[in-house]
Amino acid sequence: MTLEIIRKNDLERSKKVYADYCENWTEYQYIEAETLVSGVEYATLMTTENSAPLDVRISGALNQIMSIYGVPEETRKTKIARALEMDYRAIGQRILKEFIEYAEKVNDAAFEDVAAKKG
């Protein structure tokens, strides 16, 4: 069920992101593309002792995903280079910090609400 929710969200996002490259695609073509993309994503995230370094896996995955949607090679190269330049560790740390702050705020508010009802 969770995978189906993710695929539906990804399907709708893909229709927007790749619309210029898939002008005449049917709903079924997008569904099939998303099924293939899910497999590429899974293969990229699952590692073994023989897996390529992360940047190589990400580059390969992005290249294949964009290929599925008909993105021209030069555009793929440009977008992959930009994606690899980003500092995702810093972005992840910022998101985690903001999530912790949010969770603490929500928990504090919930605790105060419960305390007020019992008091």
Image (spheres, grey):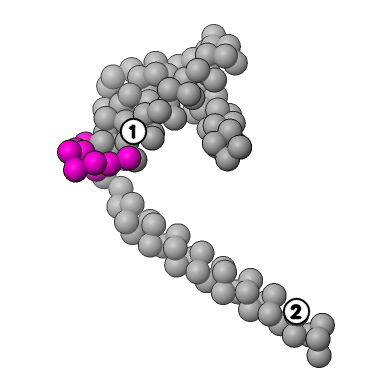
29 to 111, vertically: above or below? above
Looking at this view, is 87 or 104 the one in front? 104
106 to 16, vertically: above or below? below
* Mark 2, secondary structure of its residue: helix
Q: For mark 2, what is the residue?
A: 113
Could you tell me which residue is drawn at 32 percent across and 31 percent down?
A: 61
2 falls in the magenta region: no
* Mark 1, secondary structure of its residue: helix
Distance of mark 1 from mark 2, alpha carbons?
Answer: 45 Å
Side of 108 where 98 appears, left or right: left
Could you tell me which residue is drawn at 49 percent across and 65 percent down?
A: 98
Q: How packed is label 2: few (under 14 Cα within 10 Å), some, or many (20 or more)?
A: few
Q: For mark 1, what is the residue?
A: 43
Q: Amino acid at mark 2?
A: Asp
Q: Position of residue 3 (x, y in %)?
A: 54, 36
Q: How packed is label 1: few (under 14 Cα within 10 Å), some, or many (20 or more)?
A: few
Q: Is residue 71 visible?
A: no
Q: Is residue 57 visible?
A: yes
Q: Position of residue 8 (x, y in %)?
A: 59, 31
Side of 85 where 112 appears, left or right: right
Is the magenta region chiefly helix, strand or loop?
A: loop
Q: Position of residue 89 (x, y in %)?
A: 32, 56
Side of 35 where 108 appears, left or right: right
Whether pointer 1 and pointer 2 mark residues with C-beta atoms closer than 8 Å, the reply is: no
- The magenta segment is 46-56
Could you tell me which residue is drawn at 26 percent across and 36 percent down?
A: 57
Where the C terminus falls, by quadrant? bottom right
Looking at this view, is 77 or 103 the one in front? 103
Where the N terminus falls, by quadrant? top right
73 to 100, vertically: above or below? above
Q: Amino acid at mark 1?
A: Ala
